């Protein structure tokens, strides 16, 4: 059994056709799981729906608390890419022994057609089932330990730190 | 480093607008990897482009030979779902020690918009990086050992055998 | 007020993921009108859901009868492209004075993402509002009188006869 | 022969995955015409690529000058919806006798999948071929004279003025 903790991020942004702005409403994760014909036993919980640039320490601790309190040993966190590494660090600091936590997100909103979201969701759900306990980021088809990854702002890709 | 061995299947079918029939041309895997912003080091090889119902023993042995001859230890095989289990069995019978081979496919062609293909590709590429040597099928967000899986023809889903 | 008479055709074909075949269920026209943010006053009626190669004289006369009996003066008929010209001819032979009837279709199913269907629907709905009474085909952004058009089987495009 | 004058607007906005902002690059009109299997004889000219809220009198006069100088009698102008009515008024004031000018746009960027753009393009290209000389707006499947239309900011739809 897997818990999917939704926090927002580009993944779930929508286009408001009246204002021309991007905004959040409900998560697309259930629709994405249907599209992927997923047969995994998952529980989806929306912790918040925000841009990860707007995520402060309090919000980050709320994510940690949700993961600590979840009965599942496998947890997938959908998250904006800009501060995904910071949240991974906060989760690692909490020493949630025995849990495998994988964070993922998207560079383009799922609703926009050209999104990496469905690929990333398939990837992260797979990693979370087989990686040993710990905190990881799954992006670009790869997985990284929380303390060995950074987002390259020039390319948008996640890469290993030296 | 991962080898992606393309064999066709629903995954890669296209719609011929002059005849109204489904057909194969080139694989969509490179385009799908771009969409997924994959940063994996992969080599893509097209072994054949056929419907897996048309795959005979000779074709199946050609796939086995390609996997045996590949220098990579991680191999992803894209394959039609109808006889995916048979090909997995043939690969297992060949005892390719030290190799992790994952087969995946799609229920709907990637080109048709409502496809599970991108999800499955992200999933299979992740499993192939972390599973121990052996032959597996990755579908519906799950992975199965070659000898513990069947396709449920009524639902289209892969499931564990008793 | 416009009547949209649905008869099937490539326009409305779907992909059956269990059998790998194309089939019909309900028309996509309401969904397409929503996507086009249409504010037209339309009544949608499904006369039949068939491949136009399977349409015989009886079926063709049923379409003529539906058009003759419709209270609207503007009628859009969605139709397979293979025998669209034959149905246009049958409609013209019925001398439905005062009615503007436009037939349209698609080369690729609407559900497949790369379809011309939405473009054709926008085009045909526009032509039907402003063309004088008569029977027309609207395809490829153009409109043709029923007796001055043919489908070019090699290119898939509709073109004027000499 | 039809001239398509591109000015930007939501129609042509793209998503910048590095900054999360919407921006313009090249117009999608050629790709949209391919998707619609258009066989119309068109010349595409990009006058500018801007949000119509940023269009000032000078820009508006540049659009008028382009339309006045175009050799074609049928001109389609792609335009942001927010000030489309103002540009239509400026075009009408220029008294471009003998020309049929149709403005259209989109509520959602073409690149975002759920766009009305392809429907509107098919509609506007059809109206421009058959309406008498004058200046019109084509949106929501309908056409309006320049002096009898307003955008309803609450619904996003264009509607007739009283």
Image: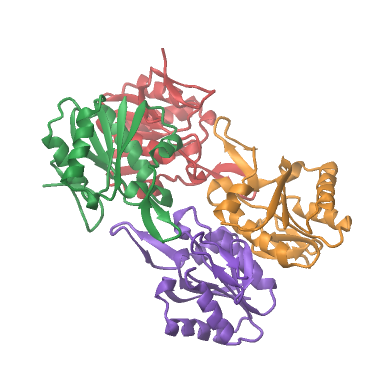
Chain colours: A orange, B purple, C green, D red
Q: Is residue C44 above or below residue B143?
A: above
Indicate the quadrant where residue C18 lies.
bottom left
> Looking at the image, is D5 positioned above or below residue D30?
above
Q: Position of residue C57 (x, y in %)?
A: 16, 45
Give the camera-side residue of B23 and B39.
B23
Quick one: quadrant of the N terminus of chain D?
Answer: top left
Q: In the image, what residue occupies the spot 34% across and 35% down?
A: D123
Task: Name the quarter where the C terminus of chain D is drawn.
Answer: top left
Q: Nearer the viewer, residue D34 or A134?
A: A134
Q: Which of the 4 quarters of the picture holds residue A50?
A: top right
Q: Position of residue D97 (x, y in %)?
A: 27, 23
Expressed as whole percent of the image width and height from the top left, the position of residue D38 reads 31, 46
| Looking at the image, residue D148 lies above or below residue A40 | above
For the question of whether residue D22 can be seen, the reply is yes
- Is residue A6 or residue A90 the one in the foreground? A6
Count the numbered circles shown.
0
């Amino acid at each position: 059994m897997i818990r999917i903790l939704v926090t927002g991020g580009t993944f779930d942004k929508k286009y408001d056709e009246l204002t021309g702005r991007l905004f959040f409403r409900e998560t697309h994760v259930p629709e994405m799981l249907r599209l992927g014909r997923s047969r995994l036993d998952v529980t989806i919980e929306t912790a918040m729906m925000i841009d990860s640039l707007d995520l402060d320490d309090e919000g980050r601790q709320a994510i940690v608390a949700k993961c600590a309190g979840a009965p599942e040993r496998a947890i997938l966190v959908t998250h904006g890419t800009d501060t995904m590494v910071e949240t991974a660090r906060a989760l690692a600091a909490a020493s949630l022994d025995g849990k495998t936590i994988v964070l993922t997100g998207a560079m383009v909103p799922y609703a926009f057609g050209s999104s990496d979201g469905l690929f990333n969701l398939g990837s992260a759900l797979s990693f979370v089932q087989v990686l040993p306990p710990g905190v990881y980021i799954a992006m670009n088809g790869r997985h990284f330990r929380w303390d060995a990854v950074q987002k390259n702002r020039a390319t948008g890709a996640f890469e290993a730190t030296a």
